Amino acid sequence: MEDPLPLHSCHVQKSCMIINRSYIFVHGTALLALLYYRVSSLLEIILAESRELPYFVSYLLVFASELVLSFLWFLSISYRWRPVSRSVFPERLPEDQKLPAIDVFICTADPEKEPTVEVMNTVISAMALDYPPDKLHVYLSDDGGSPVTLGALREAWKFARFWLPFCTKYGIKTRCPEAYFSKDDDCDGSLSRSSSIEFIDDKKEIEKQYAVFKERVLRIQENTSTASKDHPPSIELIKDADDDRANQAEMPLLVYVSREKRPSHPHHFKAGALNVLLRVSSMLSNSPYMLILDCDMYCNDSSSARQAMCFHLDKTISPKLAYVQFPQKFHNISSEDIYDSQLRLCFSHMWYGADGLKGPTFTGTCFYMKRMALYGTSQLQKDANLAQLQKVFGPSNDFIISIYQKNHTNGREFFSTVLKEVDLLASCSYEKDTEWGEEACILV
């Protein structure tokens, strides 16, 4: 039997590597010459019979600063030593029915500081990823437990029922509604559709639907109370009561999660919210892979999920792979930005060098992670007894069972049966006397 074709390829950027190493050699030689000059001059000053103290101190400070800067430059060499580039082949992935499921985690905390419409755009863009809808599960963590966020999420579900078919039908690339409607259609690869009467009519209709959606969200925001730092857990499966199962099957699972927060319990901010999402999702979808997003980082590439699977499903690197990091892209940056607020040096240069060594830096958002990488393989010994597992993962036996049940999904039909258990998993006291945040899951 022939080996399957690789899902990705990795190439060393030889020309860039040669230029970088040449630069390192020239710069390093000059640096050594400078340091030699400084040391020899310093020895002459020390051995001199008459030396001025102010001159000696100032020279010593300059020399110390040059040593520090030289050390920092030496550390930066690793980013230039072996830059690599990778290519993916999504067309070689298994058919949709055999693709693994993905859980999408989006975190928000306060609708006053994080505009609700922008948060919902992130949610909708995640729901619209180019991936089988039955393999996609979107969770929104609302740390403020705000009725504004919950109400807006219900409206986002209603609008997504129109937006997702529109994106699929016309192959829309920009699947964040706000970003799509704020730019010219030609920028989205729609030149071939611009003359289509049906497309123009459908776009006008969906734009009207989006305007109605925004108006409803803003009305909810005006008439509803805001975030709270003292509230019980609340988990809700977002759906329309009048929807039949056939219609819901075409939509990704959408879940609202608000963990319990009490002033007397530490909540560990975003890390604590992600730990709760990890536990709650294990009882509903339990997908082997997760996409982590900040609430203001919408999915600007709908094919990112398939690209990430080209790495996670490639047998040559999958056993040693924990996550696939995508770069962040920023908008509304000043044209006179002199401080590189877009982090172009990091994403377009340094990461290629880091990838040639041990991998890019973990940025905390825009990455596809393997669920088992967070559980910790050292904690999942087959002969581990229940007491040991509860010490690590907490008192929920159902959650511990889910850890060993790969690709097991409860889904919509079983939501009511696990509701009591997910409330326990979202409680603020669940992690007490366990190793959550230390040996397992997101570090706090």
Image (cartoon, rainbow, N blue to C red):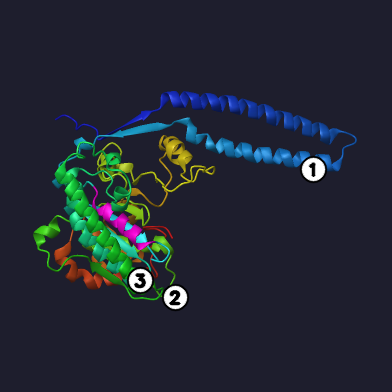
Q: CA distance from mark 1 to mark 3?
A: 63 Å
Closer to viewer: mark 3 or mark 2: 3
- Tell me the number on the disc at residue 57: 1
Q: Which residue is mark 2?
A: 263
Q: Find residue 146 and report its image quarter.
A: bottom left
Range shown magenta = 115-129
Q: Residues within 10 Å of mark 1 (few under 14, many from 20)?
A: few
Q: Which residue type does callout 3 highlight?
A: Glu
Q: Are marks 2 and 1 in contact (CB under 8 Å)?
A: no
224 vs 324: above or below: below
Q: Secondary structure at mark 1?
A: helix
Q: Are marks 3 and 2 in contact (CB under 8 Å)?
A: no
Question: Quick one: 72 or 348, which is closer to the camera?
Answer: 348
Q: Which residue is mark 3?
A: 222
Q: Residues within 10 Å of mark 2 (few under 14, many from 20)?
A: few
Magenta span contains residue 125: yes
Name the side, left or right, on which 241 lies relative to 213: left
User: Residue 40: image x %, image y %?
Assistant: 76, 30
Q: Which residue appears farthest toward the right when viewing the image?
A: 50
User: Residue 240: image x %, image y %?
Assistant: 16, 66
Residue at 74% x, 32% y is 39
